Amino acid sequence: MYECEILKCEYNMTTEVGNLIKQLLKENNMSVVAFAAAIDTTRENVYAIFKRNSFDSDLLWRMSIVLNHNLFTYYDNSLEQELMKLNHNGSSHSKEANVRQELDWVIAENTNLKRENELLRELNELLKSTHKKA
C-alpha cells in the first residue's frame, strides 16, 4: 500500500501483477530461464518478479512484449478507480479541476492505447518474420 501525501489517497494494487506474470508464463509454456533471457535478467530476478506488484516502466514494457499482454492496464485501472473514488467522495475540487482531471485521464488512456498499439505492431512483425522463416 502506498499513501499519496498530496491527495491523501491510498494506492492498493488489487491485481497481483507478479502472480499474473507467473500465470502468463505458464499459459505461454515459457520457462523461467527463457523469460529471464528475453527480458535481459536472471532467473533469480524472475522469481523475485513473481512476488512483486511494482515495476519500473521499462521492465513492465519488456515483460508486456515478451508475454504479449499489456501489463500497464492493471495500473491504469487502479488509477482510474482511485480518481473516481476521489471525485465521488465530495472532494472540494472545482469544476475546472474535475475537467482537467478527466482530460489528464483521457491523455493517459490515449498514451496507453498508443503503447498497446505499438506492442501489437511489434508482435505482428515478429509473427510475420517467424512465419517467413518457417
Image (tube, grey):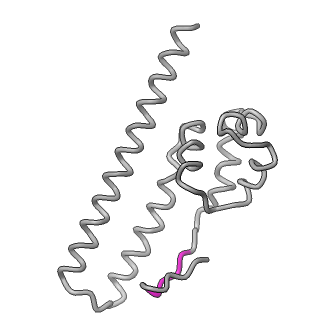
Which residue occupies 40% across, 80% down? 85
Magenta-drawn stretch contains 126: no
Q: Relative to residue 64, is residue 31 drawn left or right?
A: right
User: Which residue is most to the left?
Assistant: 96
**Relative image position of residue 89 (x, y in whole percent):** 37, 88
Which residue occupies 38% across, 75% down? 83
Quarter location, residue 77: bottom left
Which residue occupies 53% across, 12% down? 131
Q: Is residue 85 above or below residue 28?
A: below
**Relative image position of residue 96 (x, y in whole percent):** 18, 80
Magenta extent? 7-11
Where, quadrant-wise, is the N terminus in this rendering?
bottom right
Q: Is residue 34 above or below residue 110?
A: above
**Relative image position of residue 74 (x, y in whole percent):** 51, 58
Q: Relative to residue 82, is residue 105 drawn left or right?
A: left
Where, quadrant-wise, is the C terminus in this rendering?
top right
Q: Main secondary structure of the magenta part?
A: strand
Q: Is residue 131 above or below residue 1?
A: above
Q: Relative to residue 95, is residue 76 drawn left or right?
A: right
Q: In this view, does 122 lie above or below 40?
A: above
Which residue occupies 71% across, 32% down? 29
